[in-house]
Image (cartoon, rainbow, N blue to C red):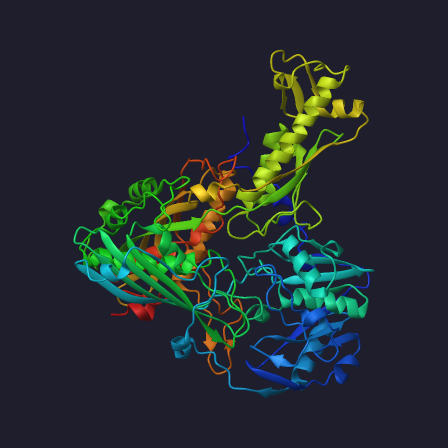
Amino acid sequence: MTVLGQPVDRTDGLAKVTGQAKYSADYTEPKLAHAVLVTSTIAKGRIVSIDAGSVESMPGGVLVMTHQTAMRLPDGGVTDAEPPAVRVLTLLQDDRVRYNNEPVAVVVAETLEAATEGAHRLQKTIRYEAAEPNVSFNKTKSSAYEPEQMMGRQASSSRGDISAALRQGTAHLDAVYTTPYEHHNPMEPHATLAHWDGPDLTLHDSTQGVSGVSNAVAKVLGIRAEQVRVICPFVGGGFGCKGSTWSHTVLAAMAAKQTGRPVRLVLQRPQMFGMVGNRPCTDQHFQIFAQTDGTLNGMRHDVISPTSTFEDWTETSALITRKLYAVPNQATSHKLVKLDLGTPTFMRAPGETSGSFALESAMDEMAYMLDMDPLALRIKNYAETEPQDNKPWSSKYLNDCYRIGAEKFGWSRRTAQTRSMRQGNVLVGYGVATATYPANRSQASAIARVLADGTAMAASGTQDLGTGTFTVMTQVAADALGFPLDKVHFQLGDSSLPHAPVSGGSQSVASVSPAVREAATQARAKLIALAIADSASPLSGATADRVKVEGGWLIDRTDASRREPAAALIARNGGKPIEATASAEPGDEKKNYAFHSFGAVFAEVHVDADLGTISVAKVVAVYDVGNVLNAKTAHSQLMGGVVWGIGSALTEVSDLDLRYGRYSNGNLAEYHVPVNADIQAIDITVLDHGDPYINELGARGIGEIGITGVAGAIANAVFHATGIRVRDLPITLDKVMA
């Protein structure tokens, strides 16, 4: 009986709940020094002077690293590495200030307390020559430009004749939807411990990509990638902000080099707002044209979002619009506005989260204009093939998601008129939205070993962001080897292990599990071959197809009495482990098929008729994500996405002070995320349909689809409850007060 798909408890769960799991800031080294960043208090200008003397003479002081004293880097620290591996970094190579909260110095001391005090004192000595910053998105939108590309994708798209479509149709929607700045706020801040051993550098770095950090840091420092080892077995949340190499990681390495000591640098919570990316705000203009029967003739989606003055980063909000509905005439565009802010970055389902809110709100508005059930409108325009390139889907069961979700939610109880459903003084609203996210896959490698003690291990240089990678890969390896789960150990989070891609884009399961499976399969084949060739083995002389491995035993399929444990076989043959290394990568399947996951999200909201307070009473979500390798961790991931979607809809916003270009709520107290009291019933269903083309296991990633569609479903439910259409997230009580 296969262990794949079973709701196996986390193999790393005990280590986490007992405090044995070591995160990046938990590591220590002899003679460890502590570093604290000093960041700018202006948004644009230059540093005139820094008085480091008083800090350098403090008890316990080790180093004050500024643009005047920092080691010089090859080419000023600028590399040809492409994002997301490395960003345009601030490495104290000049006196420029490009945004508020940008690193301007590093204070290193014997203790964290001394370093913190030194950074506080140094901050007061810095004199700036400030220039007038441009941080107003609304005032600068008129200067928006189209980027050359968006991570390899075209910024604009078109199909059919959108101009002709604008002249057709009986219903016409023209609306603008906006989403705010948002920040990731993982429980674990970014942290790095840097330790040089001669020319070699070891980094304990909280990252979503150990190999990416290794390559990026090596390029910035001008050394070989083999000289940089990055270790990160556990990540206390990343959500995209830890998918790139940022300034603090290289600064820690520089400080360790200059002091000749291991240096630990952990970002303070307010420093998480600015220098390590965020979801940018968006301005999304929608036009939809439809016939009376709900057939969509044309759709236009134009997105404007901000980026920094020194690097282009695009929130790809219109990509979802290109893929989701069968609209013959469509145009999308993305434009950027340069502001004196830090560069944005990936944030859970980047583009799809913000884009699905706008698209699904617009579809809901069109349904009301047509006096049509919002779910029926979506089904009417169901895309049987991928609309942009007309490729067949690798696998798609979205209609089943709609049907099952509607039944479980009780959609048939919905009355069409707004403000028509009440429970006493509470207005009740029902809303629906579609969820979708691309199914991504990259090349990955893995190693598997069968050991002399009867256990086995598998390993790959991937990461576990808390999503369950340790557990899922253990299941994959155990299944392929034929070993019990408790006899298999999986290793990850080390750039010295076989290469794996960044844990982003929901690709880890789809990419790494085929490599682990292949390595384990080859190791099992070698084990069987050894038994067949061993004259002392009960399996001697058998053909390979007659021998199976089950529970760690080699067994003759035709005569179960001919059997022996793997440990005995290996011990008799010298005790050397059986080992295999394998790689797996996508082929040409993307040329022939479109790969996406889908879902349907139904939300019930309650709005106090007098106070405008909003609560989400129930969310029912049904997903088509290919084969699930662990039912328990998958459910957890999808539920977590729904919870974040509730936060995105109702609470999350980073408040930018337009006078100073600094986020005024840069802490966990004032950046509001949902807590247990905010969350009520969440019902998750995953369909049992493997994807026959994504990989041998039929499994797609699920880390990000859970957040998509949720904000749209809630916004639509709020409209149904109140009759007030809120097009600007978050939906707060002041926006629904009649």
Quarter of the figure with the C terminus: bottom left
- Residue 158, image x, y percentages: 34, 58
422 or 517: nearer the eye? 517
Q: Residue at x 72, y 20 (%)?
A: 531
**Where, by quadrant of the figure, is residue 578 drawn?**
top right
- Residue 673, image x, y percentages: 46, 62
318 or 626: nearer the eye? 318
- In the rendered view, would you say 655 is above or below 153? below
Q: Residue at x 45, y 44 (%)?
A: 591
**Where, by quadrant of the figure, is residue 653 drawn?**
bottom left
- Residue 455, image x, y percentages: 70, 32
Quarter of the figure with the N terminus: top right
How many numbered discs, if any?
0
- Residue 189, image x, y percentages: 60, 63
Side of 58 where 428 appears, left or right: left
**Where, by quadrant of the figure, is residue 236 drawn?**
bottom right
Q: Is residue 472 visible?
A: no
